[in-house]
């Protein structure tokens, strides 16, 4: 009887332990790359903090360019990012892999520029983003290279190419807010590296919050949610600090107006100055300009001035905007001087600071009612 009892206990224990056993889904990543002049492919898993990837496996391409990876992934696991990387530092192909996926890729020629993917909707979305965004970024790099030798292209060409890349990025994120592909798309700032004054004009903290909300709905167990929460908190802390910091003096800048006359910011010392960074292509900026005119006329004779800095890449377009709008204040061109925007930590457009009579500088709202209160307080 005792033997039967212990046998039943052993069977029950085995059953419980089997019930706790992780069930894995067979997952494959395969494909065929031809004409790419590569002989092997590496599979890397991106860490949950989206930092250093870990190499999982490598495989040599067959004679016809085929390859295949087999993975066993916990069936309850949230989708994760993986990368296919190649020798000679070629650009990697990023995939989103879920348990049980059978992902297949095909490419002829340059893998990154020409690959197509099926078997993973998220990975297909990343493919779509890569083709659109990096095609423009490659053109931007070509323009930048030609600018250094003063051939074929102008700074306006570079500026418009950067804008095109950023707009395609914003459109993609907005259209795919609840997708991991949008999380991937957020993490690129190639255009801003070429045109620093556009930093913050495209992707900003609003897009991060939108994607966070979307991922919490679609992938509530995703480890990437914590990354977004942390990055949003860091950005908000920096913004809050910037809003509260008071400087004893402001940096000096000197830029030219539409008549090529130079104006130093320090020429306005002793007055209350609105230092305003704007872009003529922005409807919001132009609406603010119209409202600001009334405020300027009301307080200019009391000691209020505006130092208006354009971030435009096309100087002719900026000149036309200034003439049409009839700016009564100092309006200068900063598009050829990206250091100006770095100097004042301009992270988005429009952006403004208010400088008091003693030279103390603070970030300010461009809401006319709030701005008027700030001006009256300092006059």
Image: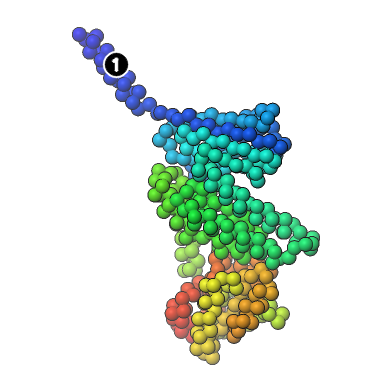
Quick one: label 1, few (<14), some, or many (20+) residues within 10 Å?
Answer: few
In the rendered image, the residue lying farthest to the left is 1
Seen at 68% across and 39% down, the residue is 108
Seen at 65% across and 66% down, the residue is 338
Q: Please tell me whether residue 89 is drawn above or below residue 269 in the rendered image.
A: above
Numbered disc 1: secondary structure: helix
Q: Is residue 174 left or right of residue 147?
A: left
Quadrant showing the N terminus: top left
Quarter of the image for residue 63 reads top right
In the rendered image, the residue lying farthest to the bottom is 301
- Residue 305's spot in the image, x, y percent? 56, 83
Q: Please tell me whether residue 158 is drawn above or below residue 11 in the rendered image.
A: below
- Residue 190's spot in the image, x, y percent? 62, 55
Quarter of the image for residue 89 reads top right
Seen at 49% across and 75% down, the residue is 366
Question: Which residue does the numbered mark 1 point to in the structure image?
Answer: 10
Q: Is residue 75 left or right of residue 182?
A: left
Can residue 358 be seen?
no
Q: Is residue 44 left or right of residue 77?
A: right
- Residue 30's spot in the image, x, y percent? 58, 33
Q: Please tell me whether residue 243 is drawn above or below residue 19 in the rendered image.
A: below
């Amino acid at each position: 009887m005792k033997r039967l009892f212990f046998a039943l206990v052993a069977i029950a224990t085995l059953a419980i332990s089997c019930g706790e056993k992780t069930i894995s889904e067979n997952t494959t990543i395969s494909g065929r790359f031809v004409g790419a002049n590569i002989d092997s492919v590496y599979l890397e898993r991106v860490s949950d903090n989206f930092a250093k990837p870990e190499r999982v496996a490598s495989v040599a391409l067959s004679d016809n360019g085929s390859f295949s990876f087999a993975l066993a992934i916990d069936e309850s696991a949230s989708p994760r990012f993986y990368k296919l990387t190649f020798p000679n530092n070629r650009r990697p192909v990023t995939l989103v892999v879920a348990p049980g996926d059978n992902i297949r890729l095909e490419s002829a020629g340059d893998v990154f520029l020409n690959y197509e993917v099926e078997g993973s909707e998220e990975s297909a979305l990343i493919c779509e983003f890569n083709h659109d965004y990096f095609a423009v970024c490659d053109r931007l790099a070509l323009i930048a290279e030609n600018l250094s030798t003063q051939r074929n292209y102008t700074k306006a060409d570079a500026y418009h190419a950067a804008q095109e890349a950023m707009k395609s990025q914003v459109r993609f994120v907005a259209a795919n807010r609840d997708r991991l592909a949008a999380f991937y798309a957020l993490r690129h700032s190639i255009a801003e590296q070429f045109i620093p004054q556009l930093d913050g004009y495209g992707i900003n903290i609003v897009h991060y919050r939108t994607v966070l909300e979307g991922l919490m709905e679609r992938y509530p167990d995703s480890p990437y949610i914590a990354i977004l929460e942390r990055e949003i908190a860091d950005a908000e802390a920096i913004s809050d600090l910037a809003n509260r910091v008071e400087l004893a003096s402001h940096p000096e800048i000197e830029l030219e107006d539409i008549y090529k006359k130079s104006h130093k910011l320090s020429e306005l010392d002793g007055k209350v100055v609105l230092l305003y960074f704007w872009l003529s292509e922005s409807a919001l900026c132009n609406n603010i300009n119209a409202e600001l005119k009334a405020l300027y006329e009301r307080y200019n004779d009391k000691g209020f001035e505006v130092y208006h800095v354009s971030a435009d890449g096309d100087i002719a377009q900026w000149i036309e905007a200034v003439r049409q709008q009839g700016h009564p204040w100092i309006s200068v061109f900063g598009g050829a001087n990206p250091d100006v925007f770095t100097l004042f930590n301009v992270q988005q457009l429009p952006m403004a600071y208010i400088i008091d009579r003693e030279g103390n500088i603070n970030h300010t709202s461009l809401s006319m009612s709030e701005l008027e209160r700030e001006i009256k307080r300092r006059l």
